[in-house]
Image (cartoon, rainbow, N blue to C red):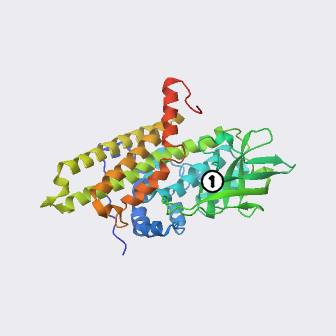
Amino acid sequence: MAKTDLFQSPDYYQIDELLTDEHKLVRNSVREWVKREVSPIIEEYAQRAEFPKHLIKGLAEIGAFGPYIPQEYGGGGLDQISYGLIMQEIERGDSGIRSTASVQSSLVMYPIYTYGSDEQRKKYLPKLATGEWMGCFGLTEPNFGSNPGGMLTNIKDKGDHVVLNGSKMWISNAPFADIAVVWAKDEEGVIRGLIVERGMKGFSTPETHGKWSLRASATGELVFDNVKVPKENILPNVKGLKGPLGCLNSARYGIAWGAIGAAMDCYDTALRYSKERIQFGKPIGAFQLQQKKLAEMITEITKAQLLAWRLGVLKNENRATPQQISMAKRNNVNMALEITRDARQMLGGMGITGEYPIMRHMMNLESVITYEGTHDIHLLITGMDVTGLNAFGG
């Protein structure tokens, strides 16, 4: 039987006062949708390792696809804080569902909007915004993760089209995506972006099975075997690694907010449990060590909320640096993962069951801490920024 979602959002520092009425309206509508549509079914889908495809229509309706893309192309025309809050609320439901929305927004719609031609924008963005078409993002390869510049996927010029060969791995949405924004090297070794469409001969998307993490999200490979791609599908306005890295900045920003949602869900669950669970004749919340866990959780969540909000302000002003985004992604995901572990201990054996969301969040965050720049890589980005010395690659 589906359980009622009793979630109450912590706001220890009255951060709501920093938000506009529009921000709160957007957040609250997404929160209600998650309570109604995601929470009752997510444990079952995660246990089955199946993506709840029926949620795509609802994600589109709440504006989760391209919220900051201008309305003329079907987006929401919202600011970056609204985007962050949407990601926070969806990840409060499940990181895998947030991944689906993140990929569609930041890794598919963003590059088409930012680097694409007006014809490409008009052709793809409105259908991506409504969820009629779903997209994925092909950067990571079997042998190139943290070092994407080494990619082997390549295109060869054949006149009016290019021929694409190679493969990509760990691709969210791949199994059901209608289009893929793929990064490949041309004959000069320059990285180019191109839009590959489902149905192009030689393009396949085998699903990745056996995941213990993001089980309610569909992951797969992208395989290109002499795929003919028309030249009008190449993104004209970017060359080099800055193309995919620009997309990842937007996605990492969304993750910095999203992870707070997972942390809040675990904190809220543990807080409620601590008042109800009786041991040694009193609620476990009355014991010092349990209070220590809860006090540290709310402190870390509050710090993360302020970090994300300030980053959102900078992003709205086009002043947020990639290094600032790295810091927030790394800090907030690590914070959320630590909270899931403490919350799991507070629930004892109940913490490992699907009756509570904690173990699912914990397993999900083990992916989030690695994807879109690993925990350690983001640390080195900050290190290089403050020292001016490059510790990568040796």
Query: Residue 310 at what x, y percent from top left?
Result: 42, 37
Residue drawn at x 48%, y 70% as measured from the top left: 48
Q: Nearer the viewer, residue 312 or 44?
A: 44
Which residue occupies the extreme top position in the image?
388
Please state the horizontal and vertical placement of residue 263, each as a whole percent of the image. 37, 51
Dot 1: what SS? strand
Q: With 323 as the anchor, is 168 left or right in this view?
A: right
User: Where, by quadrant of the figure, is residue 94 drawn?
Assistant: bottom left
Q: Position of residue 251 (x, y in %)?
A: 54, 47
Residue at x 38% of width, y 42% of height: 304
Q: Which residue is mark 1?
A: 169
Residue 266 visible (yes or no) = yes
Q: Locate residue 97 relative to residue 128 in the image: left or right.
A: left
Q: Please tell me how many numbered marks the rendered image carries.
A: 1
Q: 203 or 317: which is nearer to us?
A: 203
Which residue is at a point 17% across and 62% down the rendered structure image?
A: 278
Look at the image and tell me in which quarter the N terminus lies.
bottom left
Query: In the picture provided, is 240 more to the left or to the right than 20?
Result: right
- The residue closer to the viewer here, 252 or 114, is 252
Depicted 43 relative to depicted 154: above or below = below
- Residue 315 seen in the figure: no
Residue type at mark 1 is: Met
Q: Nearer the viewer, residue 177 or 225?
A: 225
